[in-house]
Amino acid sequence: MCPDSAFSTTAVIADTQFKLTQGTELIQRYAASPQRLKCFCGQCGSPLFIQRLNRPETLVLHLGSLDQDPGGRPERHVFCDSKAAWHEIAGGLPQYRIYPGFEPPLP
């Protein structure tokens, strides 16, 4: 099993809204599934974005890699069935087992 954090914050953005300004030679890609390439820094291993091959017009951007506030705020919690047992999800945002549209919200 690969070590991972308890959670991450991501945003789906148009690929036209994203531009790498430096370090492009450091980007490594891992085929996490037939439709997703996880892109990360080959030097430090930080996750940066996910290329969705079935929706190439969008990227899933890991917001922890940004230097500035992205301006948006969380709208939902996903993958709640696989969260760390010690973590309690607070707040009133909708919770999903996978993604909205694939499974109903958790109670």
Image (tube, rainbow, N blue to C red):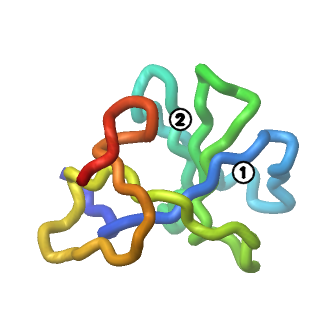
Closer to the chain start, of discs 2 and 1, is 1
Q: Is residue 17 left or right of residue 66?
A: right
Could you say whether the residue bearing mark 1 is in a helix, strand or loop? Answer: helix
* Amino acid type at image mark 1: Glu
Residue at the (75%, 60%) spot, across then down: 23
Q: What residue sits right under mark 2 in the picture? A: 37
Q: Is residue 91 above or below residue 106?
A: below
**What residue is at 73 percent from the left and 70 percent from the top?**
70
Q: Position of residue 11 (x, y in %)?
A: 62, 54
Determine if residue 10 is in view: yes
Which of the 4 quarters of the picture holds residue 50? top right
Q: Residues within 10 Å of mark 1 (few under 14, many from 20)?
A: few
Q: Nearer the viewer, residue 36 or 95?
A: 95
Q: Is residue 62 above or below residue 37?
A: below
Q: Residue at 33% across / 68% down in the picture?
A: 5
- Residue that numbered label 1 is attached to: 25
Nearer the camera: disc 2 or disc 1: 2
Whether residue 28 can be seen here: no
Q: Residues within 10 Å of mark 2 (few under 14, many from 20)?
A: some
The percent coordinates of residue 10 (x first, y second) are 56, 58
- Left or right, 90 with reference to 59: left
Residue placed at 40% from the left, 28% from the top?
A: 33
- Give SS at disc 2: strand
Q: Please tell me in which quadrant of the rendered image residue 64 appears.
A: bottom right
Q: How many marks?
A: 2
Residue 101 in the image: above or below residue 105? above
**Seen in the image, is 57 located left or right of residue 1?**
right
Specify the amino acid type for callout 2.
Answer: Leu
Query: Residue 34 placed where, x, y %?
Result: 44, 21
Pick the residue in front: 29 or 98. Answer: 98
Q: Are marks 2 and 1 in contact (CB under 8 Å)?
A: no
- Cα separation between marks 2 and 1: 16 Å
